[in-house]
Amino acid sequence: MIVSIHQPAYLPWLGYFEKIKKSDLFLYLDTVQFQKGSFQNRNKIRTKDGWIWQTVPVQTKGRHFEQSISDVTINNQFHWQFKHWSAITQNYRKAPFAEKWLPCLEPFYHTPYEKLSDLCWDMMSVFINGLELTTPVQKTSCLPLVEGNKSDLILNLCREVKADTYLSGSQGRDYLDESSFARAGISLVYQDFQHPIYAQTYPEFEPYMGVIDLLMNEAQPAAFLRG
């Protein structure tokens, strides 16, 4: 039972989905604090000049250290949907599979989303299907209350879902208490993501874009995820 855990992310990168592919269960960690300036509400898209950020504005009012991600509200006064959709259509309209994916993405930029987590969840579901992933995904907000900070929280979540292996991102080395996992009988494996090179709309490959960059440009995007 390999479990991976990750916070909600807007237009997630490929490593997010490789982790899902390599897992028997993926936990959508929407019960931790929102982090300002993180990938929870922003990511990159490719342009002819390199890349640009796409950031969903949120209403934290200085309370981002007190809000769980599931409670974070989008600030729709900034008309971000119009801006993001304009940027996506402008930069990807000539991509080989734009006719397939632009209609799939358009509803996200016309639906009046209130919560960031709901937007990220709905987008993730579409991308999972596009990448032909079959791993079950569960929100931590739908589990019984699991407490703890950082390493203890991850360990307790693994216990809750009866994991015997936890697949961590590479940054887990900085905060996970490996001895605690060993005592609990849970193996700890770190993701070693090797970014694939694929066709892009513009010359000179730029890695670490949001997943839509791969989907727009390759006929078989699932083939670019290892697992």
Image (cartoon, rainbow, N blue to C red):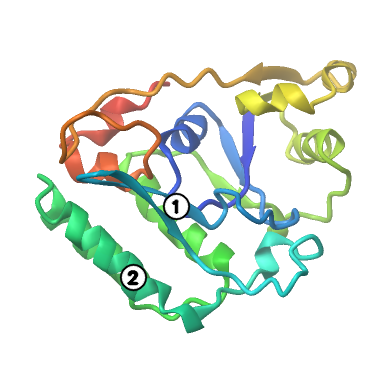
Label 1 or label 2, whichever comes before in sequence order:
2
Horizontal and vertical percent position of residue 124: 44, 52
How crowded pointer 2 is (Cα within 10 Å; few <14, some 14-19, many 20+) is rated as few
**In the image, 83: left or right of 94?**
right
What amino acid does circle 2 point to? Answer: Lys
Q: Which residue is mark 2?
A: 83
Residue in front for this viewpoint, 137 or 43 = 43
200 to 115, vertically: above or below: above
Horizontal and vertical percent position of residue 142: 70, 59
**In the image, 154: left or right of 90?**
right
Quarter of the rendering containing residue 176? top right
Horizontal and vertical percent position of residue 78: 46, 78
Looking at the rendered image, the disc whose residue lies closer to the viewer, 1 or 2, is: 2
What amino acid does circle 1 point to? Answer: Met
| Quadrant of the rendering where the N terminus is positioned | top right
- Count the numbered circles shown: 2
Horizontal and vertical percent position of residue 15: 47, 32
Q: Secondary structure at mark 1?
A: helix
Quarter of the rendering containing residue 35? bottom right
Q: Write the residue at 27% across / 62% down.
A: 87
Q: Is residue 164 visible?
A: no
**In the image, 98: left or right of 55?**
left
Q: Secondary structure at mark 2?
A: helix
Query: How far, Cα to Cα, is label 1 from label 2?
Result: 20 Å
Q: Which residue is mark 1?
A: 124
| Quadrant of the rendering where the C terminus is positioned | top left
Q: Is residue 189 visible?
A: yes
124 to 168, vertically: above or below: below
Q: Write the residue at 20% across / 54% down.
A: 91
Residue in front for this viewpoint, 161 or 93 = 93
How crowded pointer 1 is (Cα within 10 Å; few <14, some 14-19, many 20+) is rated as many
